[in-house]
Amino acid sequence: MSQETLRIQKISAHAGSIPGEGTQREFQVCKLIDTTTCIGCKACEVACMEWNDLPFGETVFDNTYQTMPETRWNYWNLILFNEHERDDGTLMWLMRKNQCMHCADPGCLDACPSDGAIVQYTNGIVDFQQEHCIGCGYCITGCPFNIPKFNPETKRVYKCTLCADRVGEGLEPACIKSCPTGCLHFGSKDDMKFLAETRAKQLRDHYNFSNAGVYDPPGVGGTGVIYVLHDASEPENYGGLPKNPRVPLTVKLWKGPLKWLGNVAMVGGLIGLFVHYLRFGPKSREEEFEKKHEGEQP
Amino acid sequence: MSAAEYREHPSQPVPPGRILRYGFRERLTHWLAGFSYLYLLLTGLAFWSPWLFWLAIALGGGQVSRMLHPWIGLLFIIAVVQMFFLWASQMGITDNDRAWFRSVGHYIRNEDEAMPPVGRYNAGQKLLFWGFFFCGILLFLSGLVLWFPEYIPWSLRWFRYIAVIVHASTALLTIGLFMIHVYMGVFAERGALDSVIYGDVTEDFAKRFHPAWYKELIGSAPRRK
């Protein structure tokens, strides 16, 4: 469908131009998660499984309010729970809905070697195309948020799609629709940033959370999922949300300078050997020549 | 094989005027390494660059290439270890080899008469051997991590970060060695390719490229003619 391909602005491991790059004007979409009003009800977890028809998997009880230790190939949306003790000895129950962050500079897409297995739509959604996935797991290495998960049965990798199928039809993602407290919002990135900053200011001015702020990490170019945190200076408290996430340096080196260096060296080497052969030829020629003329008298 | 075995080689008669250079096990190991490396090279290049991804398609598709690459890698590392046991004792770097490296310019310009006398392996061949051995070990270890990235827990993700860069850089080093090796064996030293297929070389070949080895074999035994 041409309408679909025009919506693509980045393709993994693609030799050639990108059909949708700069051809359509579209809003960057964004999911806003206000951790200060999340009650950990897990309606979003259920809605995610229902809309995406994911098979039910075993939950793991670990004496907290968390369904399982981390997201799975068939469990893309997980509320992480942490009982955080503050300096004054009081406790906070921190709930963070964890899923793909839909980075503007996605490490999974950088690392992927298979043409078209990972795409980024012009609205910012990063989506895996499993029919092109070869199951190498490089996306797992490229992701700074531990999101892509390998399915050993199909040998392909899966993750949250930000309900790209719903968003394409003008609907909000399933998790947003299910949230009973209104802690989840969906809209354009600009609107969500404004809403988030307003809420953070409210928390700072009226609720005594002087470090309240918005999590939209610049290290990955900003994300299509942003958080309002009570304490934005310590995101690690929220189920290990990285403070300054970046695509791993070795992945950047491998896909950047090393690739150039390697390609130049390989092509240069081939040319060099060919030129050497033209200039000096094989080592055995003189011997053969001598042998040929062995019987001849000078 | 020891020098005595090359002289006697009761298992493999060679025509008169020719000398056994590679025994059956050596040839078999070489080609196990060679063919497995070729597959690893082609599929590896497919994963290296989008421009070469068609190689994976041509070899059965991306999924098949991803599935077989590690298994063929196991064959390759078996061959490399086998080579270590066959040849490591002959690959020690000597003062003669250091002198060889100093005059490598003559070797490149085919001025072989200016080179120090070479034994069974010249210093370049020894470098190739150790290069492939150490890169092979690194490729194997990093490859194990890349084979099962999903089983590396998040707390040990540094293994994966190190593995991707080590696997790619050591693979590039071996590609450099491989290109020179194929060029020397197929194009530059005529007779070398035959020697690793049939096992024997002409006396001229031995005298010209491995005079010290030739002397060791012939000088200590009566010539069979």
Image: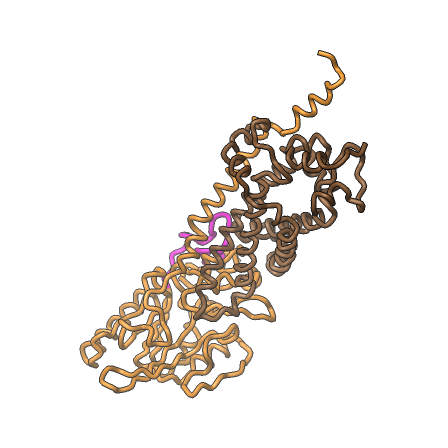
Chain colours: A orange, B brown
Corner quadrant of residue B214: top right
For the point 56% across and 58% down, the residue is B140
Q: Is residue A236 above or below residue A111?
A: below
Residue farthest front in this picture: B220
For the point 63% across and 29% down, the residue is A282
Residue farthest left in this picture: A205
Q: In which quarter of the image is the C terminus of chain A?
A: top right
> Which segment did they paint magenta?
A5-28
Q: Is residue A191 above or below residue B46?
A: below
Report the front residue among B182 and A13.
B182
Figure label count: 0
What is the x, y in percent for residue A94?
A: 33, 81
B222 on left or right of A42: right
Report the front residue among A176 and B150.
B150
What is the x, y in percent for residue A241?
A: 36, 72
Residue B130 visible to the viewer? yes
Q: In this view, does B48 lie above or below A231?
A: above
A250 on left or right of B176: left
Residue farthest top in this picture: A298
User: Majority secondary structure of the magenta segment?
Assistant: loop
Residue B160 on the magenta span: no
Report the front residue among B143 and A209.
B143
A118 on left or right of B78: left
B202 on left or right of A260: right
Report the front residue among B219 and B224.
B219
For the point 56% across and 39% down, the residue is B123
For the point 42% across and 48% down, the residue is A257
Residue A11 on the magenta span: yes
What is the x, y in percent for residue B192?
A: 68, 37
Residue A275 visible to the viewer? no
What is the x, y in percent for residue A84?
A: 31, 82
